[in-house]
Amino acid sequence: MPTTTSSSSSSAASSSGNRQADVFSRLASSDPEVKLKALREVKNQIIGNRTKKLSFLKLGAVPAIASALSDADCSSNSSILVQSAAALGSFACGFEAGVQAVLDAGVFPRLLRLLTSSDEKVVDAGARSLRMIFQSNQAPKYDFLQEKNMEFLFSLLNSENENVSGLGASIIAHACGTSVEQQVLCDAGVLEKLVLLLDGSLSQREACLESLATVLKSNPEAVSRFVGLEAGRYMSSVTELTKDRYPRTRLLSCLCLVVIYNTSPSYFLNMGTKSSLVTTLLELLNDPGQSGDEAALGLSSLIAEKEDLQKLAYEANAIKNIVDILKTGSELNPKRLQGLFLSLAELCSKLEDCRCSFLSLEMLDLLVNELRHKNADVRTAACICFRNAARSIKNLSAGRFTTDHVMLPLVQLLHDPSSSVQVAVLGALSNIVLDFSSPKSTFIEYGGIKQLIELSKSMDPNTRCSSLRALRNLMFLADNNRKELFYSEVKAQGFVALISDPEPSVQEQALALLRNLVDGCINSIEFVFDEDGLILDTVGRQLRKAPQAQMAIQGMYVLTNVASGTELHKEAVMQQLFPQPQAESNNFMLKFLQSHESQLRSATVWTIINLISPSSPGALDRHVKLRNEGIIPQLKNMVNDACLDVKIRIRTVLSQSMSFGDN
Amino acid sequence: MPVRVVESNAPAQVSGSDPGNRSPLPRSSLLAAGQAFSGTQNVSNQQKEEAWRVNVQIQGVDLEHGYLCGTMEALNVPMADTPVITFWEGEIVDGKNYTFNTGKWEATREDDLRHWSKFPSFAPLQGQVESDGGRQLDLSNYPYIFMRWKEQYFVNVGTDCGLTIAGFYYVCFSCSDGSISGFYYDPNSSPFQKLELKTVNEGRSGFSFSSYELQ
């Protein structure tokens, strides 16, 4: 005979479910007292509790509360207005699904109307709630270009109510996106209004700092205007706030200074300020909350491309500090991981000491683990970290990066679904494949050559360029086996396609790759003669087309390398330089010798040096030809070339020339 | 997060291609990554005359930071069964990153002058270096490059191979023909062991150049 049983857990679940269902019916009650109590209950349960927010959300709490707010709006019941606004604000606070639900419930215009209430508490609640919404990217677009919107914004900024003025600042912080908007806001005097909030309450200060950063970002005029306010008084205030006792204030003031530094570094000539900014951000890295996440990204933005700041950070023990945080073993959230890896990457970008220091801390295993992180931004940042650490030739030479457990996950990321990860890993692999003529290559063992060749056919020119750069590096000082392995996958036709790519940067890498292919053992030169000299002909053709300097440099080095071979090789190069028949205006050699790029002049002179190298029988005849084509006379005009290297090479040619009896 | 795609003028300074023009010394074609040199190191002492064959390969040059690095391979080393390869790092005397004054590795100013003055190409500079360390010297048009090379680790043998890499080399490179001479300095080894190298062209009739580009 079946009996009903009730286990303790199911009864607890059912009773909490009953309570929740009960709350809903009370929210809809016509008795304001009951409604108010229900609102308070929901609000108290969800504050700071994401799980509760989610569960109430799923039950449709937001529309129910939105209804309560609408009804109270009509009946002007202040308490209900305050509580429902507070509850809605709580749902939106740091919870994207909550923001979505609030906006979907269509209650946003009603919340705005609360700001005009005569009841200060209602205004307050409305402002707080709206501020939560404006923290999110889903907040409605605010059109600053519309005059009435600007008036409304200023009315908020002018309010004595700190939540209302803070709301004005929040709107600016999260909705100002373009330089046009920045300009419009500055012209309307928003900077002068915002800075007054710096002397206000904590919440006003923080809102002000956030919005300043948005208005000043990448806008030198806005920065200049801000710094000029009251002869730099507010700039000093922001600087002072980096020492405030509240971490979030310290963070926001630092981020504001980072924006100013990146926009107009001349305001930061004082080493002490720079140093203080770096050390404050480093300290904030240890903050367990959102401030720590943002500090990491802020630090990477500050030190990016700035060797002096990287040095300051390194001397302040940044690398060890960051590595210690990463090694704590606790689960760090993706934003923080991304920021920490990017900071490490920037530290390793230019300074060999930093790279060596980082690599000595046994971080590669941890980095390899994060290559498998489910968040694409983290994987990308880890790859960039790898890429920059692998700029250390010392460590590349020691084979640090070519162990299986490092190489395999990197190669696998070439097929990552995220394109930013693919680009980043291609960059890392480009450096890591430089194994300086070590015959064994784990990269090749994992099928790397085929993958790179595939990527060299991508629709995206950056990918084509990057993959060719990686192949170029792979072929640097490569032995014959490796060259054959590569060439067999490409062949002459494939090479011609690469050299003839529509993008100059891709052509440049293809030619640099070819240059490496024909370097080394003299037999390697034969690659360009495959299929009746197809590749060499293509190189000649490209050089005749008035190419960009960087491409021409690589092309001339291909010819230089070929011309260092046998008599036949040298003659073949002469054929490319002076094909019959040709108009004089096609003499690209003369043009290259007159280039502003010293490397191009240098490469061209090297070709000549090799062509008339005294050890070869045909040198004299080639010298005659070069003289008749105006090349030797041109070199005589260049004896005092501004570039020492070019000058030295020209003197080599001319002394050889003299030994041929040429005056 | 947008990823910076490196343009062909690579921002990474160490390269086998063009480092850009923020460097105190100009680029020299033959002192570049991929270039190989071959010659001898004279390791004679009072007991006997001895020379090892040496091959050097440059793996990286960063003129902006006055840095270069590479490998050195010593052949016919009596204590070793195979050639011994070491990795070295170099400091380029450019007046900005490094001067003629070593200031470390147990080398005094007197040791410095004693070694630099063994290079004929140092003679025109000697007076100024003696008086103020060469601070006013502009070496950007001088066709010789002075360096210190310090071996950092053994590539293919253990540290117990009976060889030492405690010292360093004072080096002079000739920009015109790429020849290198050097003197090894180690207070615990025979003094003035001379290194003499020339460019190597691997059986070619002329010069060949390879390059890489770091991203």
Image (cartoon, coloured by chain):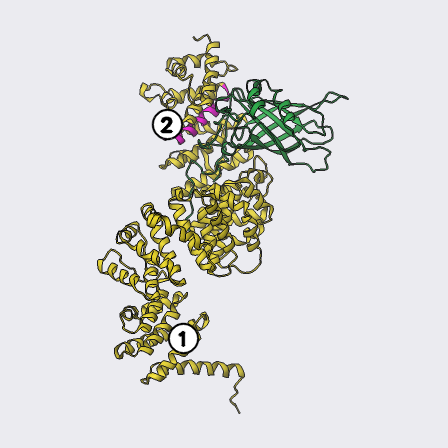
Chain colours: A yellow, B green
Residue A587 figure quarter: top left
**Kind of residue indicated by mark 1:** Lys
The disc at residue A541 is: 2
Residue A376 place in picture, x, y as percent: 46, 54
Residue B8 figure quarter: top left
* Chain letter, disc 1 residue: A
- Magenta segment range? A546-566
Nearer to the camera, A108 or B197: A108
Give the spatial CA distance, label 2 vs label 1.
75 Å
Residue A562: say if magenta: yes
Q: Is residue B195 in sight in this rendering?
A: no
Residue B66 place in picture, x, y as percent: 53, 32
Mark 2 residue element: helix
Residue A4 place in picture, x, y as percent: 51, 89
* Chain letter, disc 2 residue: A
Q: Looking at the image, is mark 2 or mark 1 earlier in the sequence?
A: 1
Residue B132 place in picture, x, y as percent: 56, 25
Q: Main secondary structure of the magenta part?
A: helix
Nearer to the camera, A413 or A550: A550
Residue A151 figure quarter: bottom left
Q: Is residue B80 above or below residue A286?
A: above
What residue is pinned by disc 1? A43
Q: Residue at x 43, y 8 (%)?
A: A663
